[in-house]
Image (cartoon, helix red, strand yellow):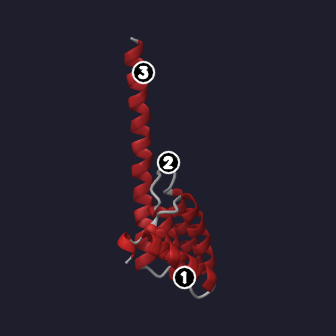
Amino acid sequence: MVIRVALVVTSLLVLGWVTVLLHDRHGGQAAIHDLRHRQLSDARFERDVEQLEDAKFLNPDSQWDIDRAGALLLRNRRRRAASVLEDLVRREPDNYQAWGVLYSAVRPIDPQRAREALIQLKRLTPLGQ
């Protein structure tokens, strides 16, 4: 009996987790679409960027941070994008895509950090190419 109860509880937890992930993915994808394809007011832009932040809830995928930084770069909010990416590369120092977007974000505003990002990109390039 205890095993059955444990199985039911575990199943409900997994089902709840998957439901949250699907809900967040749907909201995040809608925000990405709007950010890329629509002219948004500043308030709507901020809501969609926040939606991307919310999409990370219970989801370990770092793509939401990269998408959020990319949206900020589209609005020329380089420092905010760099902040998102700096946090990401601290957590995931081998994330090639994060280093690449960080390089794009900081190149015009922080040449030293851009050089450091390039060094990391070269470190992560297979065979040092």
Q: Residue at x 52, y 62 (%)?
A: 93
Three-letter amino acid code of the residue under disc 1: Arg
Residue at mark 3: 6
Say which label, 3 or 2, has the lower sequence index: 3
Q: Please tell me how crowded label 1 is: few (under 14), some (14-19), or many (20+) other residues with Cα within 10 Å.
A: few
Q: Position of residue 122 (x, y in %)?
A: 45, 75
The quarter in which the C terminus is drawn is: bottom left
Name above or below for residue 18 compared with residue 64. above
* Tag 2 near tag 1, CB within 8 Å: no
Q: Which mark is residue 26?
A: none
Say which label, 3 or 1, has the lower sequence index: 3
Q: CA distance from mark 2 to mark 1?
A: 28 Å
Name above or below for residue 89 compared with residue 15. below
Q: Is residue 126 left or right of residue 115?
A: left
* Tag 3 near tag 2, CB within 8 Å: no
Q: Position of residue 105 (x, y in %)?
A: 55, 80
Q: Quadrant of residue 2?
A: top left
Q: Residue at x 51, y 69 (%)?
A: 68
Q: Which mark is residue 75?
A: 1
Residue at mark 2: 58
Three-letter amino acid code of the residue under disc 2: Leu
Q: Residue at x 63, y 82 (%)?
A: 112
Three-letter amino acid code of the residue under disc 3: Ala
The quarter in which the N terminus is drawn is: top left
Q: Quadrant of residue 110?
A: bottom right
